[in-house]
Image (tube, rainbow, N blue to C red):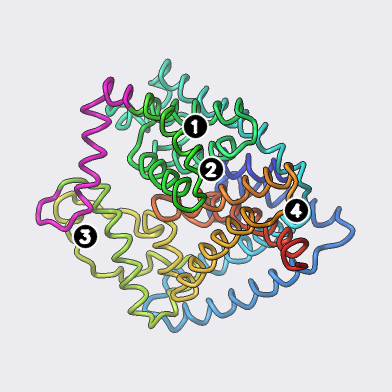
Amino acid sequence: MLRLWFVANILFWEYHTEIIGFKFGANVAVLMLAGTLWIFRKKEIADSSIKVLFILCVYVLFSYFVAIIGPCNDKLSKLIITAPIFSFLIFVGWDVGWSVSDNDWLKLQESAIWILLAAFVGFIIEALLPTSFPDTAIYRSEDKLSGLFSEPSYAAVSLFPVIVILLVAESKKIRYNGILALGALVLFSGSSTLMGLIVAWSFYRLFVQRNIKHFLYESTGLSFFVGLAAIIHHDRFVAPALDRIAGLVPTNKIINLSSLVYIQGWQDALVNLLRTKGLGLGFNMMGCIPLPDVLERAIIAKEYKLQLNVEDGSFLLSKIVSETGMIGVLFFVVIIWWLIRMEKNIRNYNHINRAEYSVLAIQAALIFSLIATFFLRTAGYFSGGILMLVVTISASVKWHRMHISKI
C-alpha cells in the first residue's frame, strides 16, 4: 500500500477524472478505492488514525462556518464536496503510515528507480514525438521537456522527492543513481523550480543535517550536469533562471511572469490572512470573489491580460495560509519543528540500527523535500504532496513514540 500511495501521488495526479461533478487527479480515484479496501480489510484501525479523523471532522465543520461568515463564499459547494474526500484520504494515509513496516519504507528505493525510469521514458518519447505533446510546445521552445507532466515545474516537484529517496540511501551505488537522476532531470527539464529545490537541498545537507561529506559528493556530481546544461542551453537555461530570480526583487520593471505570479501568491496569502482576521477563507475556498486586491495581480492583468493561479496561489503555502489562516501558519511551524527534532534524534539516539537509520533518513528527507515544494510550486491539496507528507509524518511519529519517548 505504501508503494501504491507514492506511485499514485507522483505519476497519476495530473491525469484528471470526474468525481461527483468535480475534476480530481486519477490518484484520488485510485487511492479512494484502495483506501476503502484498506479500511475494510484491516482488523483494527490505529487509535491515532481515529483521533486524526476526529480532528479533521471538527476542522471541516469549523471551516464551513468560517467560509459562511467570510468575505466571499461563492465556492462553498467546492468545500462541501472536496473536504470529505480529502479528509478520508488523510485518514487512510495516516493509518497507512502508522501500519507499514521499515521494510516497506526501504522498498521505496526500488520503487523510486522505476518511477524515475517511467518519467524519463516520458521525456524521451516527447523528444522523439513532439507532435504528440502539443500542450507543452511552449516549454520545448525553451529546451525543456515535461514528459508525463503538464509542465517542467510539475515534473520537478513530483520527481524531486523521489530522487531524495535515492540520495539518502546507505548504498553508494543507489546514491550515485540519485545524483545521475537529478543531473538527467536538470538536462531534460531544468526549470527554475528545480534549481530552487536543488539550492534548498544543498542548504538542508549542509546546515540541517550537517553532512559536509554528502554535500560535497552531491555538489561535485551535480556541478557537471548543471555546467553541461549551462553550456548546451545557456540562453534558454541560465538566462530564464536568472530572470526569474531578478523578478523577485522589488522593481518597477516587469521582468518575468513566473516571478510576478509567485509574488502574487505571497501577497494573496497575506491579504487573505488579514481580511479574515486570521481565520482563513475556508477549505478549498481560494479564488472566491472578490479576489485580493494586490499589486502583482493588477500588473499581470494589465500587461499580460491574464488571471493566473487564483485558486492555488501558485504554491501550496499560499493556498494553505489563505484558506486556513493562522492554523496554516502553525501547521508549517510545527512541521519544520518536527523535522529539526527528527534530525536531532537521528544524530543523538545511540540505539538506531542500520535499517532504522535508513528508514528515518528517507522519512526526514521526504518531509524536507515536500515542504520545500510547498514553498516553491504546487497545484493543490490533491496534487500528491500533502498526501505523501501525511504518510511520512505518521510513520515518523510512531517511531518516535516507540523509541525516543521511552528514554
Left or right of 204, for residue 273:
left
- The amino acid marked with disc number 2 is Pro
Q: Mark 3 — residue? A: 296
Residue name at image x 80 percent, y 57 percent: 39
Disc nearest the viewer among 1 and 2: 2
Horizontal and vertical percent for residue 83?
Answer: 58, 66
Gap between marks 1 and 3, in whole Å? 31 Å
Given residues 26 and 359, the one toward you in this image is: 359
Neighbour tally class for label 3: few under 14, some 14-19, many 20 plus, Cα within 10 Å: some
- The amino acid marked with disc number 1 is Leu
Which mark is on residue 148?
1
Neighbour tally class for label 4: few under 14, some 14-19, many 20 plus, Cα within 10 Å: few
- For marks 2 and 4 on the same chain, the one whose residue lies earlier in the sequence: 2
Quarter of the rendering containing residue 105: top right
Disc nearest the viewer among 3 and 4: 4
Left or right of 355, for residue 87:
left
**Magenta residues?**
227-254
- Where is 113 relative to 359, above or below? above
Disc nearest the viewer among 2 and 4: 4
- For marks 1 and 3 on the same chain, the one whose residue lies earlier in the sequence: 1
Whether residue 77 is visible to the viewer of this picture, yes or no, is: no
Gap between marks 1 and 2, in whole Å? 16 Å
Given residues 91 and 31, the one toward you in this image is: 91
Which mark is on residue 161?
2
Q: Mark 4 — residue? A: 351
Give SS at disc 4. Answer: loop
Horizontal and vertical percent for residue 391?
Answer: 66, 54
Disc nearest the viewer among 4 and 1: 4
Whether residue 17 is visible to the viewer of this picture, yes or no, is: yes
Residue name at image x 18 percent, y 61 percent: 298
